Image (tube, rainbow, N blue to C red):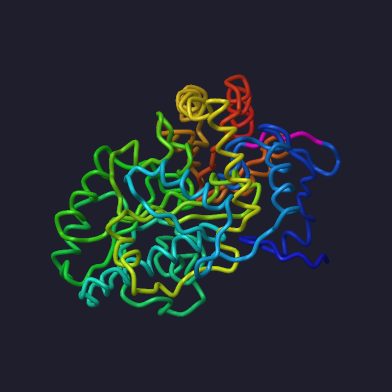
Amino acid sequence: MGSLWHGFADMGAVTDNGPFVITRGEGARIYDADGNEYLDSTAGLWFTNVGHGRTEIADAVARQLSTIAHFSNFGDHANDTLIELAERVAAMAPVPGSKVMFTSGGSDAVDSAFKLARRYWTEQGRPEKRIIVSRTKAYHGMHIGGTALAGIPLNREGYGPDFMTDTECIDWDDAKALLGLIERVGAENIAAFIAEPIIGAGGIYLPPDGYLREVREICRDHDVLFIVDEVVTGYGRIAHGHWFAAGRFDLAPDIITSAKGLTSGYVPMGAMIAAPHLAEPFFAGGTWWRHGYTYGGHFGAAAAALTNFDIIERENLLDEATRLEGDLASAFGPLADLDAVAEVRTGLGAVTAVQLADPSDAPAAVLRLRRLGVAARAAGAGALQISPAFVMSTEDVNELAARYAQALS
């Protein structure tokens, strides 16, 4: 029995079968310890947007680490690489003048957003605005706040009922449910509403037409902060010329949470992006926000992020993500005709889900795909996640779909 404790795993099964040891990656492919090749259908865990094996990013991190690896960005400490990254992310943000706080990852960014929402209302003299509203099927990381607001019941089991007080959860696809909650508990008590543009780990569910703009208007009309969780969708996965889904849907959110594609997963890093009015009380002087992380804004991670953005821009990978939207719909759409498939959810960015008719077959389907040379993953209630790197070619998408069809036939 090995010493490594895997996340989200039945460790008894891992111990019995042994781990799937991945030794290297190149583009949209990974390789195991025996040299076997696999098409990576998920870009790692949604994050390897520029593909595996980018030595340019590794070299940039090495240069930064050899100069100074990290110090701190508490107080007035900074670093030129980190300052440059903050300006670059702020320029990508859909709300001009946004401020950027860097974290160690997506869960940190989400909890930071919750804390900022409550603290902002306190600064406005309205401390009673504390309730954070989330949705069924939602995933917002695995810290205390994110777990408390998860719309995936299994992720909350066994920890007791009171992770975080003053939370509410509404149906994921009904904007009127948000309006009903506001009428029931009072807008004067609600700090913020958080939503993923595409529900990710909860099963890859695309938003109903007009849903995101409707909830945005409800929040604006009732003085409720709107947090868009773009840990999965940020930095080009929804594309059509936009770095963020919030830009594609013209949402002008109060806060964006992000991670994954920020560095394409080469080094852990997250970011919380706050609209100017959220930051103003803390930038005006005399007010501290006593919050931050030791490795938030790590200098080496900042170097990785800058080089990641250079690659995306130089190789026009936002356009490639847009191409993948059509490729995935064309290649995977026909799988809906298979008896084993209940539905294929596709048509919004470089994201697709193959929903199995029998959700309990998902773990076995992932193993069948592995035997066919595909690294796959199940999400939600029996959905197979497809979220490839932006560098995956049309030919590889077609081959990927063919192997899925074979595994599910």
| Quadrant placement of the C terminus | top right
On screen, residue 215 versus residue 41, left or right, reads left
Front one among 251 and 409: 251
On screen, residue 248 versus residue 334, left or right, reads left
Res 283 → quadrant: bottom left
Q: In the rendered image, is residue 380 in sight?
A: no
Q: Main secondary structure of the magenta part?
A: strand
What's the magenta region?
Answer: 36-40
Residue positioned 78% across, 62% down in the render:
15
Residue 327 picture location, percent across and down: 50, 23
Res 388 → quadrant: top right
Residue positioned 78% across, 60% down in the render:
16
Front one among 48 and 235: 235
Residue 84 picture location, percent across and down: 52, 47
User: With respect to residue 391, does 173 lie above or below?
Assistant: below
Residue 105 picture location, percent across and down: 55, 58
On screen, residue 239 versus residue 214, left or right, reads right
Residue positioned 70% across, 40% down in the render:
370
